[in-house]
Image: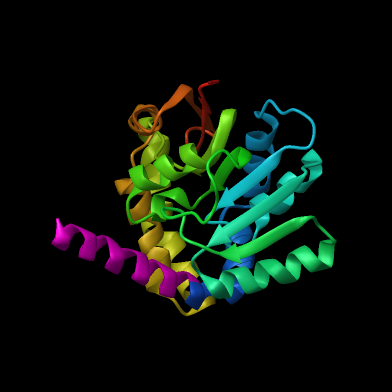
Amino acid sequence: MFKNKEKIAEHKKRNREMFDAIAQRYDVLNHLLSGGIDVYWRRRALNSLQLSNQPRILDLATGTADFALAADRLNPARIIGVDVALEMLRLGVRKVEERGATTALMGGDAEHLPFQDESFDVVMGAFGVRNFGHIPSGLAEAHRVLRPGGQILILDFCEPSTPLFKQLYKFYFHNVLPLIGGLLSGQRQAYAYLPNSVSSFPQGSAFVRLLEDAGFVEASATTLTMGVCSIYRGCKVLS
C-alpha cells in the first residue's frame, strides 16, 4: 500500500513539473495541434449542462483556465479553478484579469479538495482528469463537494474506433504531435506523454463505470469528432 501511494505521489510530481515546464507555450500549442477544435469541444460540453440560475462551478485541473473562462458565459455565481501546476495558474490568472472574468484560480489537488461538502452545483474538468494520480479518488472528491442534484462534466481525449481513422489518429498522435510539440516547446517528452496518457486512460464505458463507482447516476459518454474526444456526464442523487 505504501509503495502504491509513493508511486502515485511520484506520478503527480512528474506531471506538475512537466506542465510547469511547458506552461508558456501550452495554449498556443493546444490550439495549433488540435486545429482549434478544442474550443468547439469545450462549448459543446458546456452546452450539455442543465443549469439553474447562477450555478457555483468548480473546474478541476484548470491549467490556464480555458474551460473556466468558457464557462463564464453561463452567468455563474462563482467559478473556482484549481490546479497543482502553479506556472499554468499564473498564466490563467493573467487571462482572467485581461477578460474581467468572475473566475478565481487557486493551487489545489483535485484528489484532496479544500472545500466543504456540497459546495458546488457543477464540477467539471477538461483534458486534465487523465493526469490525476488516482482517478477514483478525484471522482470521489468531486462527488463529495457537489450538492445533491449537482452535475459532473468531464471532457477528455479518447481513441477513435473506426479502423482507418484510428490508424491515422495514432500516427498523428504518436509521431507528428510529439515532433511538432517538442520542436516548438523544447519539451518533446511532454508531448510524447500525451498520447501515452490517452492510451492508458479509461475511456467510454470504462470511465462511465468509474463515475458510477464514485456514486454518480445517469452517467453517460458522448463522443465528438469521429471519436477523438468524449464528454462524460453524471449527477449526484438528490437527497
Residue at 33 percent of width and 31 percent of height: 206
Residue 110 in the image, given as x and y percentages of width and height: 46, 54
Residue 237 included in the magenta stretch of the image: no
Magenta part mainly helix, strand or loop?
Answer: helix
Residue at 53 percent of width and 62 percent of height: 83
Residue 189 left/right relative to 106: left
Q: Is residue 9 above or below residue 152?
A: below
Residue 162 in the image, given as x and y percentages of width and height: 39, 30
Q: Is residue 220 above or below residue 89?
A: above
Residue at 33 percent of width and 39 percent of height: 202
Residue 79 left/right relative to 189: right
Tell me if I can see residue 36 in this picture: no
* Stretch of the chain drawn in magenta: 1-19
- Judging depth in this view, the residue of 140 and 74 nearest the camera is 140
- Judging depth in this view, the residue of 102 and 149 nearest the camera is 149
- Judging depth in this view, the residue of 224 and 125 nearest the camera is 125
Residue 88 in the image, given as x and y percentages of width and height: 58, 70
Residue at 66 percent of width and 35 percent of height: 44
